[in-house]
Amino acid sequence: MPLDTTIYSLALLRLDGRRWNELRRTRAQISVQAAADGSSYLETGNTKVLCTVSGPSEGGPRRSGGAGGGEDTAMVQVEVGIAG
């Protein structure tokens, strides 16, 4: 759809052609990686994010904690990769 320049001055447009009150297009998907236990994809403008979740997996040996027996603990490991 062509821009109606009688309503919007070209001086009020952003560099990418959006009006001052117009948001970037956003796209989101879930379950995009079959090999992961959970995954999602989010795209807003030129920013793209792919997130995957794997687990739970067995940890190291359990430690007994005090007189009450074993202590349940959990660990979350996060890896971040940035494409250039």
Image: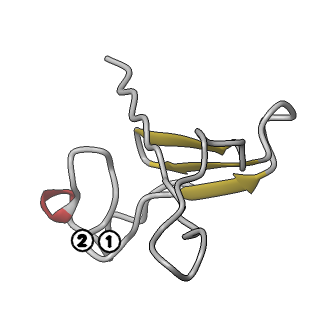
Q: Which residue is mark 2?
A: 20
* In the image, residue 14 above or below residue 67: above
Name which residue lies at 71% across and 42% down: 58
Kind of residue at badge 2? Trp
Name which residue lies at 40% across and 39% down: 46
Name which residue lies at 62% across and 42% down: 59
> Percent x, y for residue 62?
59, 51
Dot 1: few (<14), some (14–19), or many (≥20) neighbours within 10 Å?
A: few
80 or 45, which lies in front? Answer: 80
Image quarter for residue 10? bottom left
**Could you say which disc has been placed on residue 34 in the image?**
none
34 or 26, which lies in front? Answer: 34
Separation (CA) of disc 2 from disc 1: 16 Å
> Percent x, y for residue 35?
83, 30
* In the image, residue 42 above or below residue 73: above
Q: Which residue is mark 1?
A: 6
Q: Is residue 20 left or right of residue 57?
A: left
- Farthest top residue in view: 84
Task: Give the position of the C terminus as an image quadrant.
Answer: top left
* Precedes in sequence: disc 2 or disc 1: 1
